[in-house]
Amino acid sequence: MSDSQLSTPDPTLDAPAAPPARKRPKPGERRVQILQALATMLEQPGAERITTAALAARLDVSEAALYRHFASKAQMFEGLIEFIEQSVFTLVNQIGEREPAGGAQAGKVVAMLMHFAEKNPGMTRVMVGDALVFENDRLQQRMNQFFDKIESTLKQSLRSGVDGDGSATPGLDAQVRASMLTAFAVGRLQRFARSGFKRLPSEHLEASLGFML
C-alpha cells in the first residue's frame, strides 16, 4: 500500500451522522400526549393550578401548538373528564353484568372507584375539584353530575336489595344508603388528593363497606 494511499482521508469517516427524522404524531396522538402530560403534572405537589406555558414546556412545544389541538385549557380538562367518565362507567357496566343487583354490587362499584383513583392520582384532583378551582365553572358542574350519576347507579343497585328485605320504604332506604356511600367515596378521594396521595382511598375499604352495607 503506498504512502499516498495512507494519507488520503476517507470522506465518509468523519461526516456527522444525519439526525433522525422527527416523527410526526398521528392524528389524535398529540391530543393524547397533551392530556397524559396534564394528568402527570397534576400528580405533583402544588399542581392545583397548571398554566398552558408550563404544560407546553413539559411537552417541548409552543403554547400555540397546544391550541391547535384544544381551543382552551378548559377543553383540555374536559378531555380528562371524558376519560374519567368513559373509564368509570364502562367498569360500572361490567360490574352490573357480572354481579347481581344489591349491596355486593354497590360495594364493588365503590371499590372500583377507589382503585381507579389510586391508579390515576392526577385524575383524582379533577374528580374532587381541586384542579378545577381556577377553571371554568362548567367543569365543576360536570364533575358534580358525574357523582350524581354514581349515586343514581348505587341507588338503583341497592333498591333491589332493599326490596328483598321487605322494607316499607325501599326507595327512601336505597336513596339514603346511596347518598351515604357516595359521600364516603368523595371523602376518601378528597383525603387521598389532599394528603399528597399518601392516604390511599382503599384503606380498610372492605371493613368500611361492611359497616355501611
Image (tube, helix red, strand yellow):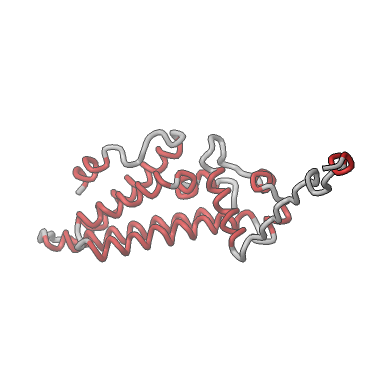
**Residue at coordinates 43% horizontally, 62% vertically from top-left?**
86
Q: Residue furthest left?
A: 166
Taking depth in this image into account, of 15 and 56 the one nearest to the observer is: 15
**Residue at coordinates 62% horizontally, 58% vertically from top-left?**
30
- Provide residue 180's location: percent of width, then percent of height: 29, 49
Q: Residue furthest front?
A: 1
- How many numbered circles does the render carry? 0
Q: Is residue 165 left or right of residue 157?
A: left
**Residue at coordinates 43% horizontally, 37% vertically from top-left?**
197
Task: Say which quadrant the N terminus sits in.
Answer: top right
Q: Is residue 204 left or right of residue 74?
A: left
Taking depth in this image into account, of 46 and 167 the one nearest to the observer is: 46
Q: Is residue 8 left or right of residue 125?
A: right
Write down the quadrant of residue 192 in the picture. Answer: top left
- Provide residue 22's location: percent of width, then percent of height: 69, 55
Write down the quadrant of residue 8 in the picture. Answer: top right
**Residue at coordinates 35% horizontally, 57% vertically from top-left?**
150
Taking depth in this image into account, of 196 and 120 the one nearest to the observer is: 120
- Provide residue 191's location: percent of width, then percent of height: 40, 38
Figure check: 43 above or below 93: above
Figure check: 110 above or below 1: below
- Provide residue 130's location: percent of width, then percent of height: 51, 43
